Structures are given as structure tokens and as C-alpha cells.
Image (cartoon, helix red, strand yellow):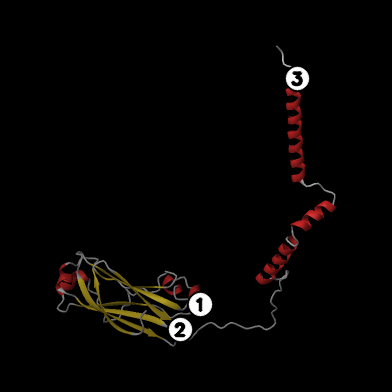
């Protein structure tokens, strides 16, 4: 994140650098790039070579205004590919935004509508040359104009509004857990003897007793059959 001031930086071919600058209501942002072009940059520049600074909002929409028809007089207008014809190889360019205003959202101009909310503005700087690996030192100057907070929207405060009431009763987690423990405790009170006695007093026969009785009958029947077979006379 950057504040107002001048920063000494450098950039390589096809590199993109992004810097965040906070902007408030009533402020506009301007950034400027100053570079002394080395010989390698002049020898490897073409029709579309040069610095291309842009400013974007936090919503990734463009925030910088188009300045091609109204650039500051001290910005370089000569294409980078023709800079070798100039006596001075100093290069200056930049980008700027309109003031941050609430009603900018109603503008049909995309350069204006992108500045309808305060927040971070992201300055993107990239360098395009015909040859990779060319390093160019440059200065980035950041300046915010306008009084911070000026023109911020004001909202009317009303004391006559009632908040809606919930239709159901809220039960806290602790109350719910305590209630579950009471229910679970009621189900496991007493011992096995109590359970057995309660079962006997109700007159109901446990399932396990029925199963054991059935197995006993089968064993007795098998024994009787075996004795009867043993007593039968053998044929000779």
C-alpha cells in the first residue's frame, strides 16, 4: 500500500506491478511515471512499446479517465518507438481518476461511474518492449487531491422503527444439553434387579426366557426319541 509521495522503482519487460492506494469520498488520485530510457529500451522499442499505467477499483472496474485528448502538457506524447529521435530520452506519463462522488454511479460514462465508492484504488504499471530482460528504473509519484470525506452521503436516522420480534423461543446450547441429560438419566435409573422385578410384576414373559424354554423342549424331545429307539427290538 502506498501513500502520497515519490517512489524509486524498476520494471522489466512484460512485467506487471500493482500498487494499492486508499481514496476517500471527495478525493481523486493521480499517478505519474518518470523514467530515463536506457539505450536498450530505445533499441528494442516498437509501435506499441512503453509504459501503460491504469487505475482500477476494488470491483476490478476501470477508474482512470481517458486523457488522450487532454493530457498534462508535461507528459510525453512521442511514442516510445520514436524516442531515439528526441534529444532528451526522459519519458513521463501517468493516469488519474475523477473525484469520488455518490452520484457518479448514475453516469453513463464508464470513466466516471467507476468512482462512486471510496476504498482502495489499484495502480497497474506494465512495460512493453520487443526484447525481454530489459530493466528500466523509474519513479512513481502518487498524489491525492481533495478533502477526505467531503461529499460523503448522509443518511436520515429514524427513532420510530421497531425491530421485529422472533416468533419462537430461543433455547441456548447449555439448556438443550442439560435437558438431554435429564431425559437420558431418567431412562437409565435403577439396576438390573429393579428392571427384572418390574418386568415380572407386569406379567410379561421376557423374550429370552421364551427362547430358552423352547430350546429345552427340543432337547427333551430329542432325548425321549433316542430312548425309544434304543428300546426297539432288533431284527435278526
Instruction: Tell me: 174 left or right of 55.
Output: right
Give whichever of 109, 115 is nearer the camera.
Answer: 115
User: Which tag is nearer the camera, tag 2 or tag 1?
Assistant: 2
The spot of residue 143 in percent (x, y) is: 35, 84
Q: Which residue is at a point 73% across and 66% down the rendered structure image?
A: 182
User: Which tag is nearer the camera, tag 1 or tag 3?
Assistant: 3
Give whichever of 71, 208 is nearer the camera.
Answer: 208
The spot of residue 29 in percent (x, y) is: 38, 80
Q: Which residue is at a point 74% across and 30% down the rendered structure image?
A: 223
Mark 1 residue crowding within 10 angstroms, few (<14) / some (14–19) / many (20+) = few
Residue at the extreme top: 236
Q: Which residue is at a point 81% across and 46% down the rendered structure image?
A: 205
* Residues tagged 2 and 1 counted as in contact (Cβ below 8 A): no
| Numbered label tally | 3
- Location of the C terminus (image quadrant): top right
Give whichever of 101, 59 is nearer the camera.
Answer: 59
Give whichever of 13, 61 is nearer the camera.
Answer: 13
Q: Earlier in the sequence, mark 1 or mark 3?
A: 1
Instruction: Tell me: 178 left or right of 4.
Output: right
Question: Tag 2, which secondary structure?
Answer: loop
The spot of residue 187 in percent (x, y) is: 74, 60
115 vs 215: above or below: below
- Location of the N terminus (image quadrant): bottom left
- Tag shown at residue 169: none
Question: Tag 1, which secondary structure?
Answer: helix
The residue indicated by pointer 1 is 103
Q: CA distance from mark 1 to mark 3?
A: 116 Å
- Tag shown at residue 232: 3
* Residues tagged 1 and 3 counted as in contact (Cβ below 8 A): no
User: Which tag is nearer the camera, tag 3 or tag 2?
Assistant: 3
The residue indicated by pointer 2 is 26
Amino acid at each position: 500500500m502506498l501513500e502520497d509521495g515519490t517512489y524509486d522503482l524498476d520494471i522489466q519487460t512484460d512485467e506487471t506491478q500493482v500498487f494499492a492506494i486508499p481514496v476517500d469520498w471527495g478525493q481523486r488520485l493521480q499517478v505519474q511515471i518518470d523514467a530515463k530510457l536506457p539505450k536498450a529500451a530505445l533499441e528494442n522499442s516498437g509501435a506499441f512499446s512503453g509504459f501503460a499505467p491504469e487505475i482500477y477499483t476494488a470491483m476490478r472496474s476501470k477508474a482512470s479517465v481517458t486523457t488522450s485528448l487532454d493530457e498534462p502538457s508535461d507528459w510525453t506524447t512521442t511514442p516510445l518507438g520514436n524516442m531515439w529521435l528526441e534529444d532528451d530520452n526522459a519519458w513521463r506519463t501517468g493516469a488519474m481518476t475523477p473525484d469520488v462522488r455518490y452520484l457518479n454511479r448514475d453516469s453513463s460514462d464508464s470513466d466516471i461511474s467507476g468512482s462512486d465508492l471510496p476504498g482502495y484504488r489499484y495502480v497497474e504499471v506494465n512495460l512493453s518492449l520487443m526484447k525481454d530482460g530489459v530493466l528500466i528504473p523509474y519513479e512513481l509519484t502518487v498524489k491525492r487531491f481533495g478533502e477526505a470525506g467531503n461529499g460523503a452521503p448522509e443518511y436520515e436516522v429514524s427513532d420510530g422503527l421497531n425491530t421485529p420480534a422472533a416468533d419462537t423461543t430461543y433455547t441456548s446450547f447449555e439448556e438443550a444439553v442439560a435437558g438431554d441429560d435429564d431425559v437420558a438419566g431418567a431412562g437409565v435409573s435403577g439396576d438390573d434387579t429393579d428392571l427384572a422385578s418390574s418386568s415380572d410384576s407386569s406379567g410379561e414373559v421376557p423374550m429370552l426366557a421364551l427362547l430358552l424354554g423352547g430350546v429345552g423342549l427340543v432337547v427333551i424331545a430329542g432325548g425321549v426319541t433316542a430312548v425309544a429307539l434304543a428300546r426297539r427290538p432288533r431284527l435278526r
